[in-house]
Amino acid sequence: MEKARLRQQVIADHLSPGPVFQRADLVASPCLAGDSASYARTAGYDDDVVIVSARRSALTKARRGGFKDTLPDDILAPVLRAVVEEAGVRPEEVGDIIVGTVLAPGSQRASECRMAALFAGFPDTVPVRTVNRQCSSGLQAVADVAASIKAGYYKIGIGAGLESMTVNPMAWEGSVNPKVEMNQKAQDCLLPMGITSENVAERFGVNRQEQDDVAVKSHRKAAAATASGRFRDEIVPISTKIVDPKTGDEKPIVVSVDDGIRPGATAADLAKLKPAFKKGGTTTAGNSSQVSDGAGAVLLMTRGEALRRGIPILGVFRSFSVVGVDPAIMGVGPAVAIPAAVSAAGVELDDIDLFEINEAFASQFTYCARKLELDEEKINVNGGALALGHPLGATGARCVATLLHEMKRRGVDCRFGVVSMCIGTGMGAAAVFERGDYVCPLTNAKQA
């Protein structure tokens, strides 16, 4: 009887002129979605944080690709401009822009990101800051904006990511604290990422052939996605220049396609490559992510704001988790972070329809998928970093864009998606997203 009374009250509230779900005892009403999990709302429907635009640049090979002669702020600016234009939001309405970025000196990159926003047409009244959680920085930026919107700091914000591994290659500056000799975990934070990949492969039995096979599949899926135009809605074409290293001649170009994909890659070809990090090892240039240049941006707001403006909703931000793991095997991070994020969202692993898991190395990607017993048909369906590249600070935002556009394409058969990655020094991050047009505010029931 109590359940029936609650449902009647929900219907009465829905039909009344006031907003839906203001009563505290109705916020966590039973879910009628039919999923296996006890999924229930923890906030009013209009207070959901939603994504209304998610775009990215093409990803290009560092030092050799389409952005090798392009400054970082000139990669980011067009992407920032694209998300507000696509959603029909005036730049001055954005409450904050947070950019995930890793390799550049902090104060310099902060200035470059501020300049990029100004180049993109944002007025000087719109603030900008950067965030660095290494490979998850782009996703962290999205999560920080979502948290700020949830806290009521502003209604509209942009979480973005940027990296030019051409301009800022990976390097350690200054001396290392000698205390690391007395703390093995701290010492392991300094391990080359390739060695952590070898550690994962050895400890968990991921052999060379498995790693090469994963790389070949990534390239084939990315090539198929490119050929069929599946990246067209997420990539922002960027007009720039390329300089001939021999003559110095400049040529205008438009970068609109990921240029690290090798459609003809075969396991036989990859088997010829020598180990890159350890004699007798299994991690090679072919089964490691590519160093790349690129940017991504995600425009978020409250659902109520999107509905008021009539902006189509691409996705709903449901949860975010970051975990710590052993620095010596940092690549296992997603295997721990994904269950944490899924649990925080109130769903179960079997309810997730798509996964975008960053392929930092084929060894760690293989281990994580195996450990979680994930369906291969749900993971990186359009390829991953082994083929597309891994511009460290931009990867999280890129994965969000790729995931949400694929969920939109799949429609009614795709409700929940996950973005996850491992993080240098031993962490993992993951976020759960829901397809934007899926849930009815009255019944929380599935919709076509």
Image (spheres, rainbow, N blue to C red):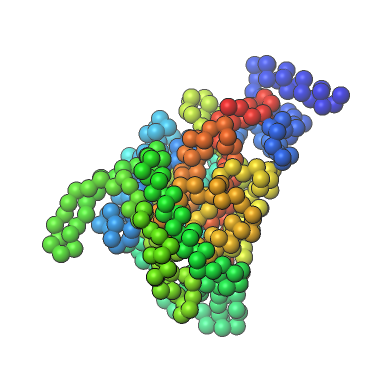
Which residue is pictured at 52% across the width and 72% down the height?
198
Residue 67 vertical position relative to residue 105 in the rendered view, above or below: above
In the figure, is residue 297 to the left or right of 333? left
Image coordinates for residue 71, horizontal then vertical, percent: 29, 55
In the figure, is residue 355 to the left or right of 88? right
Q: Quadrant of the C terminus?
A: top right
Image coordinates for residue 54, horizontal then vertical, percent: 45, 40
Which residue is pictured at 47% across the width and 63% down the height?
212
Image coordinates for residue 303, horizontal then vertical, percent: 56, 31
Residue 393 appears in the figure: no
Which residue is pictured at 50% across the width and 68% down the height?
208
Which one is in front, 214 or 19? 214
Image coordinates for residue 283, horizontal then vertical, percent: 47, 70
Residue 420 appears in the figure: yes
Which residue is pictured at 51% across the width and 29% down the height?
306
Which one is in front, 328 or 272? 272
Q: Quadrant of the N terminus?
A: top right
Q: How many marks?
A: 0
Residue that protrudes farthest toward the right in the picture: 1
Which one is in front, 443 or 205? 205
Residue 175 vertical position relative to residue 211 in the rendered view, above or below: below
Q: Quadrant of residue 29?
A: top right
Residue 342 vertical position relative to residue 335 in the rendered view, above or below: above
